Image (tube, rainbow, N blue to C red):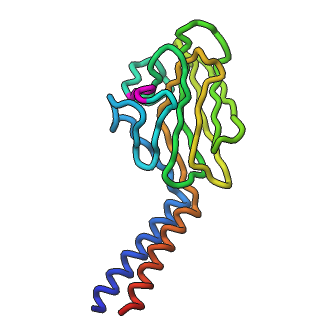
């Protein structure tokens, strides 16, 4: 019986230390290649990517060498114009970052910026450049919040742009991970008291 209690204590301690280590160093990377060929809505780890225009508004697929600053697998809007892309997280996040590209297939040559909104708040605009000999403008998004967020809305300032994103990472809110660790420790203590 004592060995079993020690085993439970070890499991609880590992869970608490895992929660603490993720709270301080836990950047989560979302592997788009794991869902290549699928369309939105789609889930990768604790992130769900979707669009009001679903099903199938965005598709995961190869970069195809179009964007030199993005990874090998991208999530690209289907069709010739941008549509909103939403990312929701199962637990609150403190930061999110990703690379993006824009394709103006209608050649309206409008504002090649991306608008990113956390928890339906005020949009933050991110600019682009056309790197090297690439044909399309690209940029990087990096946003954070001290209060945490569980939703990200992505739109283009130029509605003619097709949105492409890649290399998504996020950082979980420390408080939510600490609560998980505390809950596991509490379960251990409650179980131990019953004996």
Report which quarter residue 156 is drawn in: top right
Picture coordinates of residue 167 (x, y %)? 47, 36
Give the residue furthest to the right.
122
Q: How many numbered marks appear?
A: 0
Q: Residue at x 61, y 50 (%)?
A: 149
Picture coordinates of residue 44 (x, y %)? 40, 43
Q: Residue at x 56, y 54 (%)?
A: 92
Front residue of 29 and 87: 87
Give the residue furthest to the top.
107
Picture coordinates of residue 160 (x, y %)? 59, 14
Report which quarter residue 23 is drawn in: bottom right
**Quick one: quadrant of the C terminus?**
bottom left
- Horizontally, is 128 left or right of 79 in the view? right
Q: Which residue is drawn at 53% across and 23% down?
A: 163
Q: What stretch is highlighted in magenta?
A: 55-60
Asked if the stretch drawn in magenta spans residue 74, the answer is no
Asked if the stretch drawn in magenta spans residue 59, the answer is yes
Q: From the viewer's perspective, is residue 60 above or below residue 136? A: below
Q: From the viewer's perspective, is residue 27 above or below residue 109? A: below
**Quick one: quadrant of the N terminus?**
bottom left
Q: Residue at x 64, y 18 (%)?
A: 158
Picture coordinates of residue 119 (x, y %)? 63, 45
């Amino acid at each position: 019986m004592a060995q079993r209690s020690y085993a439970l204590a070890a499991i609880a301690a590992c869970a608490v230390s895992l929660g603490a280590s993720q709270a301080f160093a836990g950047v989560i990377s979302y592997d788009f290649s794991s869902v290549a060929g699928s369309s939105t809505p789609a889930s990768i780890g604790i992130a769900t990517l979707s669009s009001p225009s679903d099903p199938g508004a965005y598709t995961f697929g190869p970069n195809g060498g179009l964007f030199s600053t993005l990874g090998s697998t991208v999530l690209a809007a289907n069709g010739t114009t941008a549509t909103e892309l939403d990312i929701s997280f199962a637990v609150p996040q403190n930061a999110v970052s990703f690379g993006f590209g824009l394709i103006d297939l209608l050649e309206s040559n409008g504002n090649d910026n991306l608008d990113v909104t956390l928890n339906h708040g005020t949009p933050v605009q991110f600019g682009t450049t056309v790197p090297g000999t690439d044909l399309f403008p690209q940029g990087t998004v990096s946003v954070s919040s001290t209060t945490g967020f569980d939703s990200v809305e992505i739109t283009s300032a130029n509605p003619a742009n097709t949105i492409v994103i890649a290399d998504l990472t996020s950082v979980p809110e420390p408080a939510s991970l600490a609560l998980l660790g505390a809950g596991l420790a509490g379960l251990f203590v409650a179980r131990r008291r019953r004996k």
